């Protein structure tokens, strides 16, 4: 270890940082495989069917990333030049490097949800019909559940249902960016099928809290998934003996769903300890899942400086903007690590309090 660098305590930058466990690696090594571009990989086929069934959808499509499943889900519902509506901090628009516009010709407008919760009326207030040669029509709305950049907020099921009813009346499709929908399900006690019922397409990441190294599954009806399968090849996402990767997804669904509750409890504990040290830095009441935000507004340092101080003590967090750091708990952060991280972050907040 070089001088001035602390021993690693907890890497809270993201839940993508988990490494596959011994059991998961074993499942991957011995997976049954075939050529998935020929739809002949039994492990991939089984994972696609399994995830589709979980959500009550007809079909599934295994892809290398959640960016790709979002791309394909949106592209299958939004014809070139028509419109997708999203919340202003949606991953689809903020963290997919413009792919929907650059590759699929999707135009977009955003509603703003200051606290990241879903308001069906705010979404619908932007919806427009195509109008002659002049105005673009809204083809789809995307909902992120949980909402990453607003602190892992859960979309309320009754709002999702209301959005479903309102969009159906207007012939507008709904795509769920459900990268962390398993966290939403575990936190709220609803079912995967409840989520699936509210949307036309849904993207689930295996590589977030579920702990797989690679992979996301898109679900929807057979026609939508057929179109997505065609576009997946066009975008260069056709994989061959991908059962090696899909096996990690099966393992994740068998072992790592219910345990997400532990991640939620640890994120809440960290936020509560920091809030206790310096009120206003964290709000444990809005930590519903595995993501917490720490505001540096009441501190003498900005978010980047605070993250640097934390890193020097072995706790890695992500500055997002000038005054907010994001902390994410996951499979590789146990109770001891979460406790130490909480203590260190609370001490730093106290030390830098204005
Ligand atoms: C991680 C994530 C994705 C997918 O990102 P990849 O890096 O492509 O796996 C999509 N949506 C949200 C909300 C995410 O957090």
Image: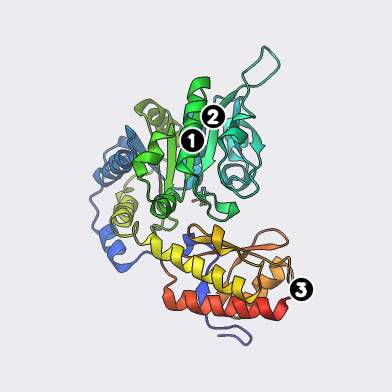
Mark 2 vs mark 3: in front: 3
Numbered mark located on residue 175 in the image: 1
The residue carrying mark 3 is 300
Looking at the rendering, in which quadrant would you find the N terminus? Answer: bottom right
Compared to residue 184, the image places residue 201 above or below, namely: above
Sequence-wise, which precedes: disc 2 or disc 1?
Answer: 2
Q: Which mark is residue 140?
A: 2
Q: Secondary structure at mark 1?
A: strand
Q: Mark 1 touching mark 3, by CB under 8 A?
A: no
Give the mark nearest the N terminus, 2 or 3.
2
Mark 2 nearby-residue class (10 Å; few <14, some 14–19, many ≥20): many
x then y, percent, for residue 210: 39, 57
Instruction: Please rate how many residues cluster around mark 3, counting C-alpha atoms within 10 Å: few if below 14, some from 14 to 19, many from 20.
Output: some
- The image shows residue 20, relative to residue 214, as above or below, that is below
In which quadrant of the rendered image does the C terminus lie? bottom right
Q: Which residue shows up at 33% across the image and 48% down it?
A: 242
In the rendered image, is residue 72 in sight? no
Task: Give residue 126's position: percent from left, percent from top.
Answer: 64, 29
Residue 325 visible in the picture: yes
**SS at mark 3 in the image:** loop
In 3D space, how far apart are the residues under numbered discs 2 and 1 (Cα atoms)? 7 Å
Q: Nearer the viewer, residue 25 or 189?
A: 189
Q: Are the residues tagged 2 and 1 within 8 Å (C-beta)?
A: yes
Q: Residues within 10 Å of mark 1 (few under 14, many from 20)?
A: many
Query: Residue at (62%, 50%) from the top-left corner?
Result: 115
């Amino acid at each position: 270890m070089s001088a001035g660098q602390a021993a690693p305590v907890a890497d809270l930058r993201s839940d993508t940082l988990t490494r596959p466990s011994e059991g998961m690696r074993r499942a991957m090594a011995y997976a049954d495989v075939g050529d998935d571009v020929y739809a002949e990989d039994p492990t991939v086929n089984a994972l696609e069917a399994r995830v589709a069934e979980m959500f009550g959808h007809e079909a599934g499509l295994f892809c290398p990333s959640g960016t790709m499943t979002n791309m394909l889900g949106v592209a299958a519902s939004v014809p070139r030049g028509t419109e997708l509506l999203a919340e202003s901090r949606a991953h689809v628009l903020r963290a997919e490097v413009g792919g929907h516009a650059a590759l699929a010709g999707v135009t977009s407008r955003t509603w703003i949800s200051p606290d990241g919760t879903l308001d069906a009326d705010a979404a619908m207030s932007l919806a427009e019909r195509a109008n002659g040669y002049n105005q673009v029509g809204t083809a789809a709305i995307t909902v992120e559940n949980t909402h990453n950049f607003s602190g892992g907020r859960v979309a309320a099921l009754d709002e999702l249902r209301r959005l479903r009813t309102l969009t159906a009346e207007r012939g507008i499709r709904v795509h769920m960016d459900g990268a962390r929908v398993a966290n939403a399900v575990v936190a709220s006690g609803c079912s995967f099928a409840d989520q699936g019922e509210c949307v036309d397409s849904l993207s689930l990441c295996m590589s977030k809290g579920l702990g797989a190294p690679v992979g996301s599954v898109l679900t929807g009806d057979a026609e939508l998934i057929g179109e997505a399968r065609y576009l997946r090849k066009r975008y260069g996402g056709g994989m061959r003996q991908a059962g090696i990767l899909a096996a990690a997804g099966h393992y994740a669904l068998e072992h790592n769903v219910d345990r997400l509750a532990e991640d939620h409890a640890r994120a809440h504990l960290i936020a509560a300890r920091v809030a206790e040290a310096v009120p206003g830095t964290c709000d444990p009441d809005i930590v519903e899942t595995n993501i917490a935000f720490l505001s540096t507004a009441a501190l003498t340092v900005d978010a980047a400086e605070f993250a640097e101080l934390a890193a020097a003590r072995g706790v890695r967090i992500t500055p997002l903007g000038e005054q907010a750091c994001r902390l994410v708990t996951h499979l590789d952060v146990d109770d001891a690590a979460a406790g130490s991280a909480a203590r260190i972050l609370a001490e730093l907040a106290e030390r830098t309090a204005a």
